[in-house]
Image: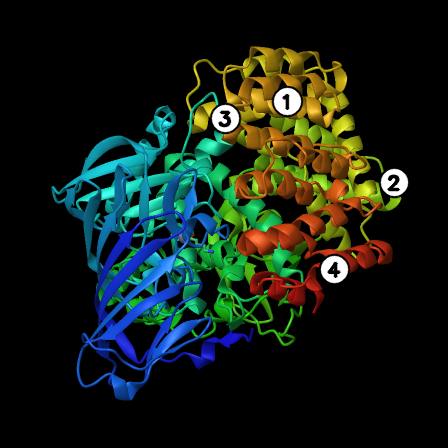
């Protein structure tokens, strides 16, 4: 398993024109017949090279004749001399066993239904093919099966008893191929595009789930309208199908005209889904739909360019969600997720650039860095060039590269051509890993405020030298009376050290720096608590307003942990002022009430030169929760009642009220013996309230009865049961966490074969900071044991979850030894997958 390198890219020896596939579906012996027209590439003549894995080859022919060929574990090669001149008709038949495919990559079965997952390199498990994104072909697919619903990409052409044919007129790489066959029912609708074309829309689900499709369908129609209005992009087929599948390695997949979704990312009802679920479903439906242009019509030349489609599509879905809901709330949520996942990745052994330069297994690079930092880079680019130039550049991108497999160079070129700017330095955001530390000092001199910035990016694996980046820094100034004296301006930093002066100011203002989180950096700024509280009260930028509350909480916690300093009244009063302010959006107030996660605090302690003690972080954080609760005790009951919502509507307003209500409930539970939470749990008529009250009880270690009742009520619902499995681990006290997770693996409904169920238990274990890092090491051992087992069945999901260990170097020598030993144990396992081998090697490296 050798790494492959971006710098080694070469065009293929052959391009594809069209592809005809016939599937004779059978669980353990599916036949796949292919007829492919190859066109020799005059730029790079050579053998016909096809990828193929786990295939039983039955026949091969070229232009109707037998030919010499070589088959290995990874592919099939036909020597150039056997190919003749001109176009080549290649025919083959292979046999595969979807029923035995537990990796959920290629063609597999889930509850009696056939489905596929081909990105990144799953098509090679279906038939022999040049499985690389720069090779695009027009696919015609025939499916033969007794199952009633037979789907593939593109438009349906013909069907009869036991068969159906599909034709996709848009050339596409194999990773966008999809096939579904099953006993499914549809929730149908139609959409008329801006130019008057009628499109049939369907969400296909297992019988019994049809009442959970309406929200997803609305989200799809909103996405279609939004992409027309904002990016001028229309849909381009007669039909758009979405299918819900229970066993799926990630959230969803943007196959052309046939998106396949993890059922948890499309099925929704008020009784079974939380507000967070609704929001996520809306965002993922939009994301996959938006890929139709950014990913499918314009795809990636090679997998190193993954951020070309993912960063841009995340950026687009974030814009969409902000438009549908609340921009400030959405932005704060994005930053929370970025810090929790991407900053963490950038700070550890798995750090890599937004465009990696090498990989062993590409599935290991569907990361927060490629996706979320990739989106941040686009947000910065837009800030640097301005809105108008951004949309002009996008129009040029779609015009120039439609139908192509493009690169980051192509992407940046449209911005250079639109604006005349040189983006060479900006491009470093794609090649340099690590999170820049931005420091700021200020001076005041006779009406002039000067901000001195310096930037430094710490070394990351295989990148010791870092260059200064282009950092757009948004700044506004607030006068001493709380009025804004200078509105948001963008300062463009390009040097290692750079200063900016604001002149002609009356009195010394307070600077609000990095408004809207204008760059993915860590800002080091030493300002006192009263100044932070002032900005929390007066900043006009909602992100910075929230950020000041968060920084106050973080500094309070660090001081409590490091030298036992009790929380200051400045912090407690400032929080109280926000929480009682009825002019503020309840969702925003709930976010201000949130405390930094234990994992965030651990990283902050490391940054300040301390060794984090997970138990101490946990205890002090709980202590702060208790102190804050006492400080707010008199207002909590009334606030809780006033945030009650009527009939459940999963919109921004309702979800905002519920999130404040539930944040208040978790505090109330600390002082009322659990009375309010028990009552809310018993009376809940929606999952947000039911799960939220259960969470409060679990956090206070009073959840046993509610857990029993919850299981009894939801036994039959696999998605709700995932919550039941997850919550009791996520909110367990540190000493019990591993034991609870272990016991749950013995539950009759636990299975290693369903990624959602596995993630429910083990994702929660890894996410329970004090529980996972409990000094016994039980959390580490339990996770490692199950990752080793899962790796045999499903390497992709196992490898992804192994990143739980990426922070091992942060902790004390005893914990380090324990974690390193578990990683070594995983690494020493016989027959370990390429996926897991790469992850363990990088983490130990
Ligand atoms: N493109 C897919 C992810 C595929 C992951 C393969 N390991 C989903 C998405 O980003 O839309
Ligand atoms: Zn995507």
Q: Is residue 389 above or below residue 655?
A: below
Local packing at callout 3 (Cα closer than 10 Å; few below 14, some 14-19, many 20+) is few
Residue 750 in the image, given as x and y percentages of width and height = 61, 35
Q: Specify which label sits upstream in the sequence, 2 or 3.
A: 2
Q: In the depicted view, which residue is nearer to us: 338 or 200?
A: 200
Q: Specify which label sits upstream in the sequence, 3 or 4.
A: 3
Local packing at callout 2 (Cα closer than 10 Å; few below 14, some 14-19, many 20+) is few
Residue carrying label 2: 564
Task: Give the residue drawn at x 50%, y 57%.
Answer: 366
Q: Is residue 247 left or right of residue 85?
A: right
Q: Are marks 2 and 3 in contact (CB under 8 Å)?
A: no
Residue carrying label 4: 825
Residue carrying label 1: 694
Residue 260 in the image, given as x and y percentages of width and height = 37, 45
Numbered circle sitting on residue 717: 3
Looking at the rendered image, the disc whose residue lies closer to the viewer, 1 or 2, is 1
Q: Specify which label sits upstream in the sequence, 1 or 2.
A: 2
Local packing at callout 4 (Cα closer than 10 Å; few below 14, some 14-19, many 20+) is some
Q: Within 8 Å of ligand 1, the CB of disc 4?
A: no
Give the Cα separation between the discs numbered 1 and 4.
37 Å
Residue 741 in the image, given as x and y percentages of width and height = 70, 37
Give the Cα separation between the discs numbered 1 and 2.
32 Å
Looking at the rendered image, the disc whose residue lies closer to the viewer, 3 or 1, is 3
Mark 2 secondary-structure assignment = loop
Q: Are marks 3 and 4 in contact (CB under 8 Å)?
A: no
């Amino acid at each position: 398993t050798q790494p492959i390198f971006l710098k080694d890219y070469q065009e293929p020896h052959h391009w594809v024109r069209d592809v005809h596939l016939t599937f004779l579906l059978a669980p353990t012996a599916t036949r796949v017949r292919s007829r492919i027209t190859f066109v020799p590439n005059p730029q790079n003549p050579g053998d016909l090279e096809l990828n193929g894995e786990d295939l039983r080859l039955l026949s091969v022919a070229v232009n109707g004749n037998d030919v010499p060929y070589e088959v290995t574990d990874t592919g099939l090669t036909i020597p150039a001399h056997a190919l003749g001149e001109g176009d080549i008709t290649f025919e083959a038949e292979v046999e595969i066993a979807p029923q035995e495919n537990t990796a959920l990559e290629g063609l597999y079965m889930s509850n009696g239904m056939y489905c596929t997952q081909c990105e990144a390199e799953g098509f090679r498990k279906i038939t022999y093919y040049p499985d690389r994104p720069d090779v695009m072909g027009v696919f015609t697919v025939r499916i033969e099966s007794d199952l009633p619903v037979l789907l593939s990409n593109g438009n349906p052409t013909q069907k009869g008893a036991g068969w159906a044919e599909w034709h996709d007129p848009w050339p596409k790489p194999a990773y966008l191929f999809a096939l579904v066959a099953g006993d499914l029912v549809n929730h149908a609708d139609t959409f008329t595009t801006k130019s008057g074309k009628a499109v049939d829309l369907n969400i296909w689900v297992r019988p019994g789930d049809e009442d959970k499709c309406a929200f997803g369908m609305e989200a799809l129609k909103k996405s279609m309208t939004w992409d027309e209005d904002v990016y001028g992009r229309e849909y381009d087929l007669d039909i758009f199908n979405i299918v819900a599948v229970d066993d799926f390695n990630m959230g969803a997949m943007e196959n052309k005209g046939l998106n396949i979704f993890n059922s948890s990312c499309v099925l929704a009802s008020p009784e079974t889904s939380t507000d967070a679920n609704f929001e996520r479903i809306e965002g993922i439906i939009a994301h996959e739909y938006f890929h139709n242009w950014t990913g499918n019509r314009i795809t990636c030349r090679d997998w190193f360019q993954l951020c070309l489609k993912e960063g841009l599509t995340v950026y687009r879905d974030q814009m969409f969600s902000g438009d549908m809901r609340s921009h400030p709330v959405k932005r704060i949520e994005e930053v929370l997720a970025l810090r929790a996942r991407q900053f963490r990745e950038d700070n550890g052994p798995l750090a890599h650039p937004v465009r990696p330069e090498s990989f062993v297994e590409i599935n290991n690079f569907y990361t927060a860095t490629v996706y979320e930092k990739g989106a941040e880079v686009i947000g910065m680019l837009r800030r640097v060039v301005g809105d108008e130039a951004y949309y002009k550049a996008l129009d040029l991108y779609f015009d120039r590269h439609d139908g192509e497999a493009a690169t980051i160079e192509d992407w940046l070129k449209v911005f250079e051509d639109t604006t005349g700017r040189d983006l060479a330095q900006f491009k470093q955001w794609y090649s340099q890993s690590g999170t820049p530390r931005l420091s700021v000092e200020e001076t005041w001199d006779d009406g002039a405020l000067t901000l001195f910035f310096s930037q430094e990016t710490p070394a990351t694996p295989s990148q010791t030298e870092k260059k200064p980046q282009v950092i757009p820094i948004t700044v506004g100034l607030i006068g001493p009376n709380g009025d804004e004296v200078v509105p948001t301006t963008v300062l463009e930093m390009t040097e290692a050290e750079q200063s900016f002066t604001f002149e002609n100011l009356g009195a010394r203002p307070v600077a609000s720096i990095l408004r809207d989180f204008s760059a993915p950096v860590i800002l080091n700024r030493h300002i006192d608590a009263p100044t932070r509280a002032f900005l929390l009260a007066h900043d006009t930028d909602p992100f910075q307003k929230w950020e000041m509350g968060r920084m106050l909480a973080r500094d309070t916690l660090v001081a409590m942990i490091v030298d036992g300093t009790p929380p200051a009244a400045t912090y407690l009063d400032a929080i109280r002022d926000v929480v009682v302010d009825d002019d503020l959006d309840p969702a925003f107030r709930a976010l201000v009430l949130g405390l930094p996660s234990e994992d965030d605090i651990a990283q902050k302690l490391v940054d300040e030169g301390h060794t984090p003690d997970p138990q101490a972080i946990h205890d002090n954080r709980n202590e702060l929760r208790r102190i804050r609760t006492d400080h707010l005790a008199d207002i909590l009951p009334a606030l809780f009642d006033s945030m009650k919502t009527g009939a459940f509507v999963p919109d921004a307003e309702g979800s905002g009220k519920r999130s404040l209500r539930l944040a208040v409930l978790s505090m109330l539970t600390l002082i009322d013996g659990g009375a309010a939470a028990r009552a809310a749990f018993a009376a809940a008529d929606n999952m947000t309230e039911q799960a939220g009250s259960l969470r409060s009880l679990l956090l206070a270690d009073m959840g046993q009865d509610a857990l029993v009742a919850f299981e009894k009520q939801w036994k039959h619902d696999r998605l709700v049961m995932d919550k039941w499995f997850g919550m009791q681990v996520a909110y367990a006290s540190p000493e019990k966490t591993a034991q609870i997770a272990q016991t749950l693996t013995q539950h009759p409904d636990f299975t290693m074969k369903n990624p959602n169920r596995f993630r429910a238990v083990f994702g929660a274990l890894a996410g329970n900071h004090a529980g996972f890092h409990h000094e016994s090491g039980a959390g580490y051992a339990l996770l490692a044991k199950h990752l080793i087992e899962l790796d045999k069945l499903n390497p992709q999901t196992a490898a992804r979850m192994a990143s739980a260990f990426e922070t091992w170097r942060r902790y004390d020598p005893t914990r380090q030894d324990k974690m390193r030993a578990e990683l070594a144990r995983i690494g020493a396992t016989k027959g370990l997958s390429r996926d897991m081998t790469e992850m363990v090697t990088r983490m130990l490296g």
